[in-house]
Image (tube, helix red, strand yellow):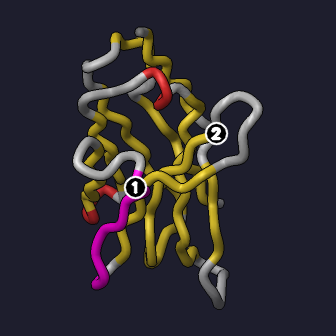
Amino acid sequence: QVTLVESGGGLVQAGGSLRLSCAASGNVIDINSMSWYRQAAGKERERVAIIMSAVGTFYADSVKGRFTISRDNAKNTVFLQMDSLKPEDTAVYYCNAVLRSYGDSFLKPYWGQGTQVTVSS
């Protein structure tokens, strides 16, 4: 059984910063990618950033230059450093990991429970 636990959300003023963390725990063998998605009220979920083993990082245009995704492979943890936050960044942020755990013969996606980020103007 694999679980993703997120932390770091909260309320911040425009121009401020927040750092999200997501740790994968359980019988993890190999992680192919870890990413952050967000879903604002009334909108579809969108991918914000992804970090892929041996490939690199990719960002949505709306956050390029402001957000930075990084990963601690030893702790199966991914971070999202969010700087210069804007009110339009307000959303529930979800962690996603595509990984293989004991008993799996293939990669599977897992989701965290979500953490609220609110940016006030």
Tell me the residue at 44%/17% (across/down): 119
Q: Would you say 42 lies left or right of 40 here? A: right
Q: Would you say 7 lies left or right of 82 here? A: right
Task: List x then y, in percent, for residue 58.
Answer: 35, 66
Task: List x then y, in percent, for residue 110.
Answer: 63, 60
Sequence order check: which comes first, mark 2 or mark 1?
2
Tell me the residue at 32%/47% (across/down): 79
Q: Looking at the figure, which quarter contains the N terminus?
A: bottom right
Q: Looking at the figure, which quarter contains the C terminus?
A: top left
Q: Quadrant of residue 107?
A: bottom right
Amino acid at dot 2: Gln
- Please check the rendered image and state whether residue 97 is part of the magenta-colored stretch, yes or no: no
**Element class at badge 1:** loop
Residue, disc 1: 61
Report the magenta residues as a range. Answer: 54-61
**Element class at badge 2:** strand
Amino acid at dot 1: Asp
> Is residue 120 or residue 36 the one in the foreground?
120
